[in-house]
Image (cartoon, coloured by chain):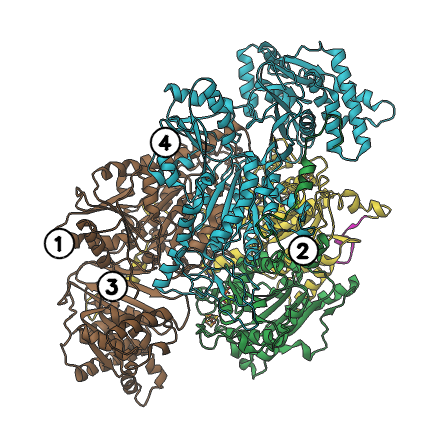
Chain colours: A brown, B cyan, C green, D yellow
Amino acid sequence: MSSEQTDSLAWRVGGPQGSGVDTAARIFAGAAAAGGLHIFGRREYYSNIMGRHSYYDVRVAGRPMTCHSSVVHVLTTFEEETLVRHAISTGEGGAIIHDVESSDVRLDRITFLDERVVKDLTAYLGERDLPPTTAGVLEDARRRGVEVFPVAYDQITETLAGDILFKPRADRALNTIAVAVSCALLGYEPEYLADALKWIFGGRQEIIDLNVKAVELAYGYVKDEFDHGRLLHRMRPVHGTEPMILVGGNEAVAMGKMAAGLTFQTYYPISPATDESVYLEAHATVPLKNGGEGAIVVVQTEDELAAVTMATGAALTGARSATATAGPGLSLMVEGLGWAGMNEVPLVVTAYQRGSPSTGVPTRTEQGDLLFAIHAGHGEFPRLVLASGDVTEAFLDAAQAFNYAERYQTPVIHLLDQTIARTTQTVPPFDVGSIRIERGDVYVPPEGDDVRGPYPRFAVTESGVSTRPLLGQRGGTHWLTGAEHTEAGQVTEDPVIREQQLEKRARKLALAAREIPAEHKLAVYGEPQAAFTIVSWGSNKGAILEALERMSAAGIDARLIQVRLLWPFPREELAPILEAARPLVVVESNHSGQFAQLLCGQTARQCDHLVVKYNGRPMTCGELTRALLDIHRGTAEERIVLRNPYE
Amino acid sequence: MSSEQTDSLAWRVGGPQGSGVDTAARIFAGAAAAGGLHIFGRREYYSNIMGRHSYYDVRVAGRPMTCHSSVVHVLTTFEEETLVRHAISTGEGGAIIHDVESSDVRLDRITFLDERVVKDLTAYLGERDLPPTTAGVLEDARRRGVEVFPVAYDQITETLAGDILFKPRADRALNTIAVAVSCALLGYEPEYLADALKWIFGGRQEIIDLNVKAVELAYGYVKDEFDHGRLLHRMRPVHGTEPMILVGGNEAVAMGKMAAGLTFQTYYPISPATDESVYLEAHATVPLKNGGEGAIVVVQTEDELAAVTMATGAALTGARSATATAGPGLSLMVEGLGWAGMNEVPLVVTAYQRGSPSTGVPTRTEQGDLLFAIHAGHGEFPRLVLASGDVTEAFLDAAQAFNYAERYQTPVIHLLDQTIARTTQTVPPFDVGSIRIERGDVYVPPEGDDVRGPYPRFAVTESGVSTRPLLGQRGGTHWLTGAEHTEAGQVTEDPVIREQQLEKRARKLALAAREIPAEHKLAVYGEPQAAFTIVSWGSNKGAILEALERMSAAGIDARLIQVRLLWPFPREELAPILEAARPLVVVESNHSGQFAQLLCGQTARQCDHLVVKYNGRPMTCGELTRALLDIHRGTAEERIVLRNPYE
Amino acid sequence: MAVKSETRRITAKDYRVDQPIDWCPGCGDFGILSALQQALARLGLEPHRVAIVGGIGCSGKSQYHIGAYGVHTLHGRLLPYATGIKLANPELTVVAVGGDGDGMAIGAGHFVNAGRRNVNMTYILFNNEVYGLTKGQASPTLPLGLQTKSLPEPNAQGRVNSLMLALSAGFTWIGRGYAFNVRQLVGLMQKAIEHPGLAYLDVLQPCPTYNNLHNKDWYAGKDRGDRPRVYALDDEDYDPVIAEGADEETVVAKMGQVIGKAMEWGDRIATGVFLENRNVSTFEERLGSRSPSYHKHAPALRPIADAEGRSLADLSDLFAQTSVTRKPGGEA
Amino acid sequence: MAVKSETRRITAKDYRVDQPIDWCPGCGDFGILSALQQALARLGLEPHRVAIVGGIGCSGKSQYHIGAYGVHTLHGRLLPYATGIKLANPELTVVAVGGDGDGMAIGAGHFVNAGRRNVNMTYILFNNEVYGLTKGQASPTLPLGLQTKSLPEPNAQGRVNSLMLALSAGFTWIGRGYAFNVRQLVGLMQKAIEHPGLAYLDVLQPCPTYNNLHNKDWYAGKDRGDRPRVYALDDEDYDPVIAEGADEETVVAKMGQVIGKAMEWGDRIATGVFLENRNVSTFEERLGSRSPSYHKHAPALRPIADAEGRSLADLSDLFAQTSVTRKPGGEA
Ligand SMILES: Cc1ncc(C[n+]2csc(CCOP(=O)(O)OP(=O)(O)O)c2C)c(N)n1
Ligand SMILES: Cc1ncc(C[n+]2csc(CCOP(=O)(O)OP(=O)(O)O)c2C)c(N)n1
Ligand code: SF4
Ligand code: SF4
Ligand SMILES: [Mg+2]
Ligand SMILES: [Mg+2]
C-alpha cells in the first residue's frame, strides 16, 4: 500500500441510514483486505433507523493502524448531505466523488442537515465569496487542492439495468458503484472488489453477478470520463501478510466470552451493546474441542434490572454468566451489582460507554462512566473495573473478566467505549490458546449420601475468599442475601460479624490488587524512560499510539501509560512510575477529567495537563499530536479541549 | 440536672420490638423534658416487626448534648435479652433494673440472642469464673460497681390490676412501671412522669389514669424495697429554660420541606426514610400565613424508579417537588437523576444512608453512599450534594435544598445518615422566619394571547442558567429530553451544540461553587487556628463536638471542619485552611474512607489519620476521644477503627 | 379530560412543528402522529395547556412534531413522569405516547400501577411488536414463535395481551385503533382524552422496516382475498360503557366482554372502544377528598412565599405538638 | 416440576432449620412456611436440589427456615433471580416466595414478563394487602378506600387483581390458597411445583399486626354469623384444565371462567386451582429447540475447559467467517 502523501489512505463514504453505507464500506474494506492491506474502520451514525446521515471511515495501510484520520483522502458520496458535511474534511491532494445531480443544491434544502452546520458553512463560504450551495462547497474544495469527480450515477445504473433489469434493483448497486469509482481512481485492481463481493454476499450469486457487473461499468466510466491517474493517492496490494480477521469490537467481546466458556448471557437491547448479544444469540451453539457442542443461553429480558439479576441467578449455579449493556442500562443495574457484591457472586457486566448522561448521544462515543462504574451502588463492596484499549484487548479482557470474577468472587465491570464497539479492524485471529480458565475456589461435594448443609459459604478467611458451593451441589446448601450475614448466610445485625464480613469482602479487593500482575494492570508504550508522560485509558490508546510515533518522528521522547485495571486502582505500580513524569498529561474522552480525578484521589498526584474530547467523536492522532506538541512547547493551557465541528 | 459522675445522665431501656420500648423512652424523655432538661435520644432496632431486640438511649442534661453515650448509667430492662446485651455497658456507679424473674436464665436459652454474643459473653464470664447465665451477668455487673435492682414486676402489675382490671391490660403498663422505677431510683419527682403520660396519651384519660396509678405503685415499690438514695446518680429538674421542641431527624426534614413550600412528594417505603413521608402524608394540609391552607400531594409510588421520575414530572410544572429514600432506593433512582440533570430540573432527593451495600443492615447507620451520591449516574451532569450534621441542620438543609435546586436548575441530593433519622433531640423550635424562598430564573409569560413557542429553554448563557418556563405557561412551550438537545430542546447530535450544552450545564456547577457562601459550605468548630484538625461530614459532628470539649479539657487545642456542601466540593475554601493542618484527621462512618478519598482527589491532600466506624452504630464521644488522644500522643495507626461488640 | 381554549379556534396547524421527521417511509407512526394533532385541535385545546410525554423508541419521538410541551422521558418511565405532571398541574391535558417495548417490557410495572390510580390522562401505545429504534428485536406483544426479520431465532417469549393487562390493572377506558385508519383514530383519541380517568389506547402500528409479518398487507388481509383482519366494534352490537353506580354483576359482565374481544387475534382484530368505565373515581378526586385545598391550588400553582420570599407555611401547630416546654404539672 | 430423591425418604424434618423465627404471633406466614416444608417433603425432593428464592419483606424471610438453598434477593426482583437459577440449572426445583408489595408493586414488570416465558417454576405470593416489613403501608392488593391501621388516610390507590394479572401475563398454572388452611395449601403447592411451567399461587395471608380489616376473623366470616368468605373451588363444579391441543374457543372459555372466579371478592372468595394450562411450551423447551445441546448440558453443568484450564470453545469457524486473508481472486 502506498500513497503519495502519507503511508496510509483515509477513505470515507457516507449517506442516509438504510441506504447501504455499511455495505459500501464493507466492500471497500473487503477489497483492500483481499489485497493484503490492513484496515482500520470506524462508523458514525445517528440514533435513527432510516434517513439520517451516517458515514464510515476506512483507513488502509500496509501496516496495522490504531485510529482513524480526521483528514480524508478520498470522500465517496452519492447524495448531497454527505458531500456538504465532509468536503471540508477532505485534505489537499484528496478526492471527492459525487453525484452530478448534487452539483448545485442549496444547503438549507438538505432535510437533515443541522441548522448549526448550515449556518457555519454558509458563513465559511460567505467569507470566501462562495454561495451556500454544494457548488460553493465543491469550489472551496477545489481551491484547497482537492480533486472533484462528478459521477453520473444514474447513467451507470441505467446501463446496468439495461433492458432486463427493473431500474430500482439496479439502483441498489449504487453503493457498489461508488466504491468501484473510488477504487478505480485509486488505481486498485477490480478483482479485489469481486473478491469482496463474493465474501459479503455469500452464496447469493445473482446479487454477486449484478454487483460485479456494476464494478465493471464503474471502472469503465472512470476510464472514459476522468484523466486516469490524476489522483495523487494510490492503493496497491501487498502480499505475504500474516492471516488476519476483520472484526469489530462487539464481536471481539462476544468471542472472548465464548472462549472463556460463557454459558449464560442476558441483555436488554441498547446501543452500542446489543450487537454483542445478538451475535451470541446467532452463535448460541458453540462447537467444542472435545467434539461436542455447548449451548449459550441468551435471554432478552424485560429490562436491565432483570438482566443483571437474572445473570446473577445463573452465576449462583456455577454458569459463567454475564450481561451486556450501555450507560442507561448500567444505571439500572446498580442495585443488582450491589447484591452480587454482597453475595460474592462472580458476575461479569460488560458496559459500553456512550454519549451521556441520560439518553445523551446514544450512538456517539464518550468515556463518561468511569467514576460511576467504580462507585456505582450504595455502600461499599469490592468490584473490579477493566477497560480495554482496542479490539484485541476487548477479546482478551472479556475472557479474563471471568477469571477475575471467579477468583475474587465478585462482580467485574468490563468497561468499553463506543469507539471500540464501532471499530472494525484487521487483526491476527485471537489467541484462544493463550486463555487459561481459572474457576477459583469452588466447593467439591464429598462422596456419600448424607452430607447436609448448611455450608459456611461466607467463612471468614485471611484472603477474604471463601469456598463457594454452587446451587444444586450436595452438602452445599446455604443462604444468600443482600443483608449482612453470618458465615452460612443467615441475616445478622451483630456488630462484630458485620465488621468481619465487611472486612472479609474488602480483603478480596486488596488481594486482587496484590495478585494481579503489573502487566495486566497497565501497559507502557513509547519511550519507557521518557519524562513526557501521557496517562490514559480505553480507546484513546489508539490515537495516542500514533501520536507517539509522530512525536518521536519530531524528535520528542514520550511515553504512554495505559491503565487497564481501573479498580482496584494500580496505585503501587503507578505511583513510582509517575514520579519522574514531567509533564504528566492525562488524555480522556469526557468533560470533567474523571480519570484525572481518580488518579489524584488515589495517588495525590495532579496532572499537569488534561486533554479531553467530548463532542461524541473519537480522538484522532492528528488533533492529539497538535495538543501534545503545544504542551511540549509550553504554549498549552492546563486543560485542552479537542474540537472538530465537522465530524 | 446533675449526676455524681458526669454532667449528664445516660439512661437506656430495651426490650423486644412491639413491647413498648419506644413508649417507655418517650415517657422518660417526656418526664425529663417536663423538668426542663435537655434530651438526646437514640434508637436501635432490628429489621423486624415484633420480637427482636430494640433499645433506646436517652441522655439528659441541663445543657444541650450532641451524641449518645456508650457507657450507660441506668439500664432499664424488663426481660432477659436486654439485661444480657447491655449489662456490660453499664458503668461503675450505674444501675441495672431487671425483672426478678430474669435473675437466672441461661444465655443460650434466649431466643434472639446472637450466637456470637452468647459465645463472647460466655467466654468473658468464664474468664471471671461466672456462669453463662443472667446471674453471671448480674454478678459481673455488681463486681464492676453497678447497683442491681431486681423488680417483681408481676407483683406490681397484679396490684395494679387489682380486682377490677383484666391482668393483661395491667401488663401493658409494664414499660411505664419500669420507667417509673428508674425515675424513683434517680430521685426524680413523679409529677413529671404524669406530665409526660398526659402528653403522650393525649385525651385517652383511662389510659392516663392507669399509667399514673402504675407510676405511683412503682414509686411505692422502690420506697419499700430499696434503700432509697443508694444510687449515685440523681436527676433534678432545671427551670427557666428556653422553649424547646422534642423532634427527630425525619420530622425535621419534613418540616424543612414544608417550610420551603414543598407541594409534591413521592416515596416508596424504605427505612429509614419512610417516616418522613408518612409524616408529610399525615400533615398534608399546611396552614398558610395568609390565612389559607395548602395541600401537599404525597404519592406512594410502585417503586423508586417511579418515585424519582414522578417527582421530576411534578417539578417540571413548577411545583417544589421531592422524593425521599434510602440506599437501595437511591440505587434505583440513578437513571432518573441523570434525566433531571440533563433537563435541568430542580429536583430534591432526600437520601438517608443506612448500613449497606444491598439490603445490608437496613436499620443501622452508615455513611456509605457519599461517593455514590456524587457519581451516581452514567455520564456527567451537575448536581449538588449536601449533608447535614444534626437535626437542626437537617431542617435547614431540607429547606435550602430547594433554593439550590431552583437557582441552579439541577438535582440536589440531601444526604442524611440513619443516625440523624433515629435521633430525637430537644432543640429550639426551628427558625422558619430565617428561610428565604428563591425560585431562580423562572419564565414570566408576557401579556397577550398570541405568544407561541417554542421557547429556547436551554439557551446557552454565560452563567449556564437559562430561563425556565413551567409546563402549562403560555408562550413557554419547548421540549425536554434526556438526549442532547438544541436550545428549544429538540434532539441533536451536532458536535458543536453537544459541546455547548455540556459546557453550559457544567458551568452551573462552577457557578454554585462560586456563589454559595463559604459558611454554607463548611463550618469550623473548636479552636479555629488549631493545627490538630478533624475533617468530617454528617452525623459524626455530634460525637466530634463533644470530643473536642474533652480534648480542650485535657488542654489540647483542636478543631473540626465540618463539610456540609460535599459537591461541588469546596476546594477553594478548604485547601487553604488545611495547609496548616497537622495532623489532618478524617472521621467518618464507613469502611473505605470515602470522604478521605474525595478530599485527596479534590485537593491532593492525603489525611494523616483516618478514623472510621462501620459496625452499624453511631460513634460516641468516648470512643472517639480515645482515638484522638492516641493520635495526639503519636501512638495511633494511620487507620483507626472504632469497635464496640456490645451495641 | 381537557381544558378548552376560550379565545380562538385551534386547528391542527397549531400543533404542527417545522422539523423533519426521521421515521422510515411507510411507518405507521405517521398516521398516529397526524391523528393526534387533529384530535388535539378538534378538542380545541390550547397547545401550552397540553403536555405530550414520550417514551424512548421510534414512537417516543412523536412529541417533537407536536407544537405543545413535549417531554421525551426515559425508556419505560413515561407514565410516572406523566403522572407527576398531571397531578402537579391538573389544568394540563397530558397524553403519553410510547412503544410496546417501552410500555410492556421495561414499563410494565408502571403500567400496572398506573391502572390502580386512574389519573385523568391518556396513554397511547404504538404497538408494532418490535423494538423499532434498537433494530428489530421482539417486543412483548410479538406472538410466541414468530420470527420477524431481524431475529436470529423465532421469538421464544410469549405475547402479552396489552388490553387484558390494562383491564387487570384498572384502566377505566380501553380502546384500540389502527395506524392506517386515521379517521377512526382521531375519534378514539378524542374520546380517550375526554374520558375523565386513565385511558389506554392501543394502536396497531405496522413497522415496515422490522415487522415483515404483521404489516399493512396482513392487517388488510391481502393474504386471504383482501378480507381485512381489522374490524370496528362500532359495527357490532357492542356497548363498552359501565355506567356510574353499576352493580357488581354488570361490571363483571362488561369485563368479561372486554376479555372476549381482547383475546381475539389473527382472524379478527377488533378496534374501537372496548371499555368505558364511569364507575371509578379519579386519583385527583381522591386527593381532593384528602385535602380539599388540592382542588383550589394545585401543587404547581399554589403560593409558597410572600413577596419578600418569606415562607407562607405556618408550622406553629406542628411545633406545639412537639413542644416539651411546659410548666411542671401544666397541661400539654 | 421436580427432581425426586432416589435414595432415601425425605420428610418435612429435612426441610426444617434450627433458627428462631421473627414473625409476629398469629402471622399467616407461619402456615405458608409449614405448608411449603411439607409440600417439598411430600414431593420427595432432596433439599440440595431445591432453591427457595425470597423477595424482600416479612414473607421474604421464609427461606431462612427451609433447609434448602435459600436466596434472599432484592425487593421485587425475585422472579429474574429465580429465572436465572432455573434456566442455568434446570435440575433444580425453584420456588419463589414474596410479598404483594414485592410482587405487585416494584416487581410487577417482572411478573408480567415472567408470564411470557413460562419457565418451569413456582411463585408463591404472600397476599396480606400491606407492606408488612416497612410497617403497614398499603400494598397494591389493598382495595381502594380501605384504611388499615397504619394508614394516615384511606387507601387512594385501587386494588390490582393478581390472579387476573397472572392470567393476562401468561402464567400457565394459577391458584389461590389461604394461610390458615394448611392442608389445602400443601396440596396446592404440590400441584404448583409439579406443573410443568410457570405456576402462580396467591395465598391470602392475614397480617394481624397491620391488616386489621382482612384478618382471620374476616376470612372466617365472624362478622356475618361465621359464614366463611373463603371457599374451595374443589367443592364446586369447576374444571381448571386446558388440555394439550385445546382449541381457541375452549381456551377463551376457560380464561373467561378464571376471570369470573378471580373477580369474586368480599362475599365469596375462591381458593383452589383456577387454571392449569397444558397447552403452552416451557421456556426450557424453547431453548432446547434453539440449541439441542441445552438439554444435554445446562449452563451450570457444561464443561468449558480441559484439565489444564484450556478453553474448550472452538472458534475456528467464527474466525474463518471473518477471515480476510485469502489469495487475490480466491474463494471466500
Ligand atoms: C434503560 C434503557 N434501556 C435500553 C434503551 C435502548 N432502547 C432505546 S429504544 C428501545 C426500544 C424501543 O422499542 P419500542 O418501545 O417498542 O419503541 P419503537 O421503537 O418500536 O417505537 C430501547 C430498548 C434505553 N434507551 N434505555
Ligand atoms: C428497592 C427497595 N425499596 C424499598 C425497600 C424497603 N422494603 C423492604 S420490605 C418492603 C415491602 C414489604 O412488603 P411486602 O412485599 O408486601 O412483604 P410483606 O412484608 O408484607 O410480607 C419494602 C418496601 C427495599 N428493601 N428495597
Ligand atoms: S423502524 Fe419501524 S417503527 Fe421505527 S421508524 Fe422505522 S418503520 Fe417506524
Ligand atoms: S408485620 Fe404482618 S406480615 Fe409481617 S410478620 Fe407481622 S403479622 Fe406477619
Ligand atoms: Mg415497538
Ligand atoms: Mg405484603
Q: Where in the figure is residue D267, as x and y percent of width and height?
A: 80, 53
Residue C270 is at least partly visible in this image: no
Give, as a three-letter code, the residue at label 3.
Ser
Q: Which residue is the site of mark 1?
A: A553
C-alpha separation, residue under disc 2 versus residue under disc 4 = 55 Å
> Could you say which is closer to the camera, residue B223 or residue D254?
B223
- Residue at 26 percent across and 60 percent down: it is A425
Give, as a three-letter code, the residue at label 4.
Cys
Judge if badges 1 and 2 mark residues of a common chain.
no
Compared to residue B71, the image places residue D19 above or below, namely below
* Chain to which mark 2 belongs: D
In the image, B157: left or right of C118? right
> Could you say which is closer to the camera, residue D318 or residue D25?
D25
Name the residue at the front extreme.
Answer: C308
C-alpha separation, residue under disc 1 versus residue under disc 4 = 44 Å
- Ligand number 6: quarter of image: top right
Q: Which residues are magenta?
A: D228-238
How many marks can you see?
A: 4
Give, as a three-letter code, the residue at label 2.
Val
Q: Which residue is the site of mark 3?
A: A70
Residue D37 is at least partly visible in this image: yes
Q: Which residue is the site of mark 2?
A: D160
- Res. B607 mark: 4
The local secondary structure at tag 3 comes to: loop
Splitting the image into 4 quarters, where does residue A200 fall? bottom left
Cβ–Cβ below 8 Å for labels 3 and 2? no
Judge if badges 1 and 3 mark residues of a common chain.
yes
The local secondary structure at tag 4 comes to: loop
Magenta stretch containing residue B400, yes or no? no
